[in-house]
Image (cartoon, rainbow, N blue to C red):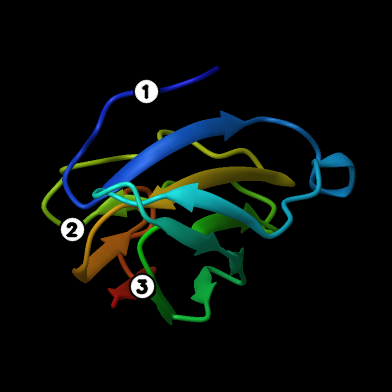
Amino acid sequence: MKRAAVLGLILPAWVLSVPAGSRPHFGDTLAEGLRGEALPVRTKHVVARNFAFEPSELEVTPGDTVVFENLDFVPHTITEADRAWDSGSVAPDSVWVLVVRTGGVVRYECRFHPGMKGTLVIR
């Protein structure tokens, strides 16, 4: 399923519902910035494991791709704290991908397990 709506600080690029071992490779490329300049694109990873996001805080820059991987045995969500965006249910052994668009501090949590919290620091 593809999503193409701009939501707050982050654009959900697409949702991948494939087993983690067979997910596509996300390499470094260049993206176009808001004013047309080339931005290096890096892929960062956050893992949901043992009912926690690892790392719990991640520093990223606009244009970076963040791959959230669910390695738990239950589904999780990646939901912005103010509910500006929500991954929906991410099944075990699946990933959800975000593309960072602007700066700021973004807090997120799992709606199913509110003790699971994380932060993206966008510089």
On screen, residue 122 versus residue 60, left or right, reads left
Question: Mark number for residue 4?
Answer: 1
Q: Secondary structure at mark 1?
A: loop
Q: What residue is drawn where x is 41% and y is 33%?
A: 88
Dot 2, crowdedness within 10 Å: few (<14), some or many (≥20)? some
Asked whether, in this view, residue 113 is left or right of residue 29, the answer is left
Circle 2 is placed at which residue position? Answer: 81
Circle nearer the viewer, 1 or 2:
1
Of badges 1 and 3, nearer the viewer stands 1
Circle nearer the N terminus (2, 3): 2
Residue 72 seen in the figure: yes
Image quadrant in which you'd find residue 117: bottom left
In this view, the residue farthest toward the right is: 21
**What residue is at 37 percent from the left and 55 percent from the top?**
37
Residue 106 in the image: x percent, y percent? 23, 66
Viewport quadrant of the N terminus: top right
Task: Identify residue type, mark 1.
Answer: Ala
Alpha carbon separation for disc pair 1 and 3: 24 Å
Decide which of 5, 15 is in the foreground and name it: 5
Contact (CB < 8 A) between labels 2 and 3? no
Q: Which residue is mark 3?
A: 118
Amino acid type at image mark 2: Ala
Residue 42 falls in image quadrant: bottom right
